[in-house]
Image (tube, rainbow, N blue to C red):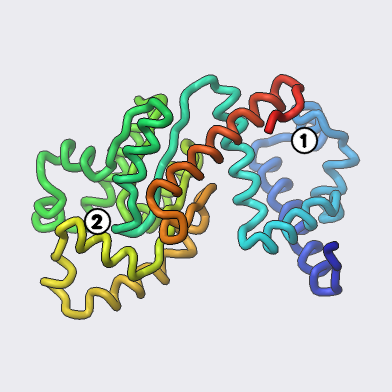
């Protein structure tokens, strides 16, 4: 049973107030009266007035508390539900984007997951290399990181516009580009492949990539620091799996189960059918 303390209720009130302010701002930006939004959304003007006033249904606050207890956020839960519903309603195949630090298993898991879902697998960095006519090392050496980020964003935008179903492995730093990360979140089921720092390191070395140790003696510590900085951004992904705990095959199985289960549940809701577990 969940117990609501004074601080919990204060947090819920602040959340409701924030939601109300956001709704009011967006309504005004779109030039909609409260009546027009009521007709467009199918909810009453009274409800909208309460919502914008910060006194809407406290279920929003309770959802936030449940999400916090699960180690996530209400926004992440809603994005996951909306992503599954939008995918089911579109009738298109899955669009899955994998994020995480180098050594998370994005390429290995991505290929296996794509095969299970019967969709093609792509690596964003390979698409960037193709667009530039250069290797990644060449891009960074000749043009620098800012050029790479800009080109990666352009390639991603074009790819998402032209490709209906896929599993996409992204570069570890994509989440640092706010525009590209938001675009990916809007258009794909985003998945953070988590791993312990030591597992990241061992996987990089097992791939034959000795660049970190050759270039920087303290690269292992740098990787830990890099992961700590990026974790809050990776955590914004819709789904996450712990590859250190599950292993590569286990991570593929869990992802497949969650993606297919969400899709079936969304389709059942759309048709007004009970969920089949």
| In-image side of 101 versus 263 (left or right) | left
Q: Which residue shows up at 40% across the image and 61% down it?
A: 195
Q: Which residue is mark 2?
A: 146
| In-image side of 261 versus 105 (left or right) | right
| In-image side of 244 versus 123 (left or right) | right
The answer to which of marks 1 and 2 sits earlier in the sequence is 1
* Residue 36 to residue 105: above or below: above
Q: Which mark is residue 155?
A: none
Q: Which residue shows up at 36% across the image and 31% down it?
A: 115
Q: Residues within 10 Å of mark 1 (few under 14, many from 20)?
A: few
Which of these two is toward me, 98 or 206?
A: 206
Mark 1 vs mark 2: give the one in front.
2
* Residue 215 to residue 244: above or below: below
Q: How far across and how far down the image is residue 53, in percent? A: 83, 53
Q: Which residue is mark 1?
A: 33
Q: How far across and how far down the image is residue 62, in percent? A: 79, 56
Q: CA distance from mark 1 to mark 2?
A: 42 Å
Name, please, the residue furthest toward the right: 46
């Amino acid at each position: 049973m969940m117990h609501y303390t004074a601080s919990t209720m204060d947090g819920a009130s602040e959340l409701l107030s924030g939601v109300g302010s956001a709704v009011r701002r967006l309504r005004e930006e779109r030039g909609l009266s409260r009546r027009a939004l009521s007709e467009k959304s199918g909810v009453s003007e009274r409800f909208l007035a309460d919502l914008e006033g910060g006194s809407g249904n406290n279920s929003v606050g309770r959802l936030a508390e449940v999400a916090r207890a699960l180690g996530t956020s209400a926004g992440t839960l809603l994005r996951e539900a909306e992503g599954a519903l939008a995918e089911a309603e579109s009738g298109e195949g899955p669009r899955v984007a994998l994020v995480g630090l180098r050594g998370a298993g994005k390429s290995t898991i991505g290929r296996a997951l794509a095969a299970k879902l019967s969709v093609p697998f792509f690596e964003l960095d390979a698409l960037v290399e193709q667009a530039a006519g250069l290797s990644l090392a060449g891009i960074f050496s000749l043009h620098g990181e800012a050029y790479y980020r800009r080109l990666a964003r352009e390639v991603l935008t074009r790819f998402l516009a032209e490709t209906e179903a896929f599993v996409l492995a992204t570069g570890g730093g994509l989440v640092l580009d706010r525009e590209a990360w938001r675009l990916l979140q809007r258009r794909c089921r985003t998945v953070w492949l988590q791993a312990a720092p030591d597992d990241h390191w061992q996987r990089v070395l097992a791939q034959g990539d000795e660049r970190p140790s050759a270039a920087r003696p303290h690269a292992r510590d740098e990787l830990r620091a890099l992961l700590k900085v990026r974790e809050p951004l990776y955590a914004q992904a819709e789904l996450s799996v712990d590859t250190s705990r599950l292993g590569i095959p286990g991570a593929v199985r869990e992802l497949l189960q969650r993606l297919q289960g969400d899709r079936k549940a969304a389709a059942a809701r759309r048709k007004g059918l009970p969920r089949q577990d």
